[in-house]
Image (tube, rainbow, N blue to C red):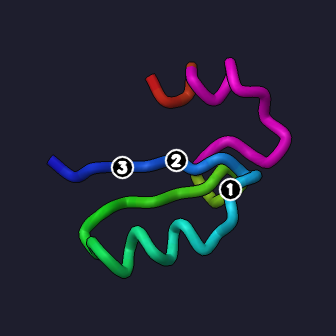
Amino acid sequence: MTVKYLLDENIDPEYRVQLLYHQSDLVVLMVGDEGVPPKGTKDPEILCWCE
């Protein structure tokens, strides 16, 4: 099973770079990326999307 992360839009994008540098088989998306909730989405809506 692949570990997947969804980072908040307020997290520095460098965190994604470093996660993938250390373990390239992770899936690391950020709010606002294609296929995930857009920037400005409220946390409760993001949690529902994650379910």
> Furthest residue to the right?
40
User: Label 3: few (<14), some or many (≥20) within 10 Å?
Assistant: few
* Drawn side of residue 24 relative to residue 28, left or right: left
Please name which of the two marks, 2 or 1, marks the residue nearer to the observer.
1
* Amino acid beneath label 3: Lys
Image point 70% across, 26% down: which residue? 43
Name the N-terminal-most of marks 1 and 3: 3
Place of residue 28 in the rendered image (x, y in percent of width and height, measured from the top left) = 45, 60
Query: Label 2: which residue?
Result: 6
Query: Label 1: which residue?
Result: 11
Q: Nearer the viewer, residue 35 or 42?
A: 42
> Furthest residue to the left?
1
Which region shows up in magenta?
36-47
Name the N-terminal-most of marks 2 and 1: 2
Q: How far is the residue under mark 2 from the one under mark 3?
A: 7 Å
Q: Are marks 2 and 3 in contact (CB under 8 Å)?
A: yes
Query: Label 3: which residue?
Result: 4
Q: Is residue 10 above or below residue 50?
A: below
Give the secondary structure at mark 2. strand
